[in-house]
Structures are given as structure tokens and as C-alpha cells.
Image (spheres, grey):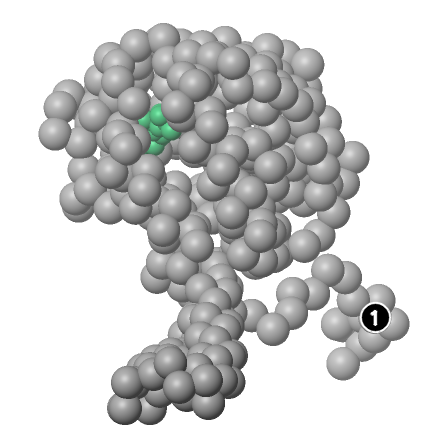
Amino acid sequence: MNNILYVVIPCFNEEEVLLETAKRLRIKFLGLMKKNKISIKSRVLFVDDGSTDKTYELITKLHSEKTIFLGLKLSRNRGHQNALLAGLLKARDNADMIISIDADLQDDINAIDEMVDKYLEGCDIVYGVRNKRKTDSFFKRTTAQLFYKLLNRLGANTVYNHADYRLMSKRAVDALSEFKEVNLFLRGIVPMIGFRTDYVYYDRTTRFAGKSKYPLNKMIAFALEGITSLSTKPIKMISLLGFGIFGISIIMFIYSIIQFLLGNTVIGWPSVIVSVWAIGGLMLLSIGVIGEYIGKIYLETKSRPLYIVDEFLDNHPKNEH
Ligand code: UDP
Ligand code: MG
């Protein structure tokens, strides 16, 4: 069984946590190697996402001291999702399975054992799912939960309470690389890949040092990115609104005729009020229709794979041809 594990860690200004993280992961790796669960060729790959502190120096130091540590430096800060993808695509050159985790180890590394077990049982994707969020602040917890609910309502399939802590087999990462999108929202795309999937549950802890690199503005940007890159439903909502308002214009039409017949109106009022509603509704409706086409173009430009092959039962071995 091929069992080279790569753990990919995006790091942005993580000098305070990096050494501790490296230490804990090394212990975990040595344990797993001893049990023969992972190959001795397994590695930890740090991706420096354009840090401005000593992060990269520390990575270089770790790399020169211990063979299990590798480093990849991006030319500038490109954000968590891009750094993660860079790491995954680099790691797949040598790895059989790749686990992504944050530098602060808020996600329990003891779940790695179970993830590897599931991979060895034949799973291609294993999601780490948080049992509870009691260590996150009330604000972060509720906003995050609202966000998941909203995303799923809008038709994007994300795994509830799963961040980017997951194991992917090499072929799952190969499949992921077929998604050519520029607006990258990995936790929405990975479920689209398919293959045999499983879940591992763990408790999320607080950051042991350093500050969150996701302040509110980045969180909102990330949420918007998630919605707009996975769903064109907001466009449909415009059409619906247009329908609604056009409907109201018909009601207003009837209402104003009644008022006119009852003699309650000033001359000109019915025509003005009906046109205001009707034109508003028609305009929204038209924007919605145009939006539908733009939505289609948007999805086309992503040139996502139409399918991903899991297995091919072939009875023509290659050497017979
Ligand atoms: N990160 C990154 N680039 C960024 C922001 C964050 O690579 O521009 C990394 C960061 O170093 C960490 C992970 O993304 O490994 C998650 O960040 P953080 O723990 O601050 O987020 P939170 O847990 O607060 O959501
Ligand atoms: Mg964190």
C-alpha cells in the first residue's frame, strides 16, 4: 500500500506558532511512522503565503534541521485558499495522501490517525468535522453557522462545520486540479469531486498563540466569495423580485381603477402609479433574464470538469495493443 503522507500548512505571519506546530507534528509523524501507518518518506509542507514576519526564516531553519520539513514560498500574500492549493498541487508530486491543516493547530492533530486509517480503508476524501464550537467566540460561532446555512440554501454543497482540515488522496487532488476556477472556495469545490468520502469528528480548540488572520472584513469577503463562486441563485432572486413587483403593479392597476370609479382620485394618479410599479417590475425582470445568461457564461468560463472517472474496468491490458 502506498502511504506517503504530506501535511500541507498555509502560513501567514505565523512566527509565534510555527515552531510549536512543527514540534507537535513531528511527534505525530514519528508515532505514525513507528506504527507503519505512514511511509518514512512522509513530509510536512509549510506554504509561506507572503508573510512579513520571520515565518519564512523559521521554515528555512526547520527545513535545514529536519528532513521531514519542506517549505514553499509564494511571491506575495495570496490568501489562505490559494496558499493551500499551491501546497496541495506541490505535494501531489510525491504524496499518496495529503492532509491540509491550519498553522495554529486549532484542529486536533490526533484526528490524523483516523483520517489515515480511513484512507487505508479506501477513502479518497476524509473531512474533519468539528464536534462543537464552544471554543470559538459567540460571534464567530453564530456568524459561521449562519453562513453555512445560507450557503446551503443558495445551493452550494458544503460540509457543515468543516473548515479546510481534510485528507485527500493523490487522485482526489488531481481531480481538484481540473477545476480551473480563479475564485477559489475549496470547501465548496471538494464535495463536487465525489469519490468515496468519510468524516472524522474532533473538538476544535483555541489558538495557542498569535492572532486570528481572519478579521471580520476578511471573513465577510470570504463568505461573499463562497456564495458568488458557487451559486448563481442571487441572480434568480432578482428575477423573482421582478415578478413580485410586476404582480404588485397588476394589483395597483385594479386598485386604481376601483379608486377611479369611486371618484377618489386626482386626474393622472392611476396612470402614474401603475406605470411606476409596472416599469420597475419589468426592469428588474429584464435584469434578471440578462443575469441568467451572465450566470451561464460565468459557469462556462470556470470550465469545470464534466465528470471525473473513478474506475475503468478494462479487459484490454495495455501490452496487448
Ligand atoms: N492564512 C494564510 N493566508 C492569509 C490568511 C491566513 O495562509 O492571508 C493561514 C493562516 O496562517 C492559518 C490559516 O490560514 O494557517 C487559518 O487562519 P486563522 O487561524 O487565522 O483563521 P481562523 O482560525 O481564525 O479562522
Ligand atoms: Mg485558526
Nearer to us in this view, 320 or 218: 218
* Quarter of the rendering occupied by the N terminus: top right
- Kindly indicate the quadrant of the structure image that contains residue 183: bottom left
Please give the name of the residue rendered at 76% of the width and 40% of the height, measured from the top-left corner: 122
* Residue 206, percent from left and from top: 42, 12
Q: Which residue is mark 1?
A: 314
- Kindly indicate the quadrant of the structure image that contains residue 216: top left
* Residue 208, percent from left and from top: 36, 8
Outermost residue, front side: 263
1 in relation to 138, above or below? below
Nearer to us in this view, 107 or 233: 233
203 in relation to 194, above or below? above
Identify the amino acid type marked 1: Asp
In the structure shown, which secondary structural element does the residue marked by tag 1 occupy? loop
Please give the name of the residue rendered at 35% of the width and 87% of the height, measured from the top-left corner: 270
79 in relation to 4, above or below? below
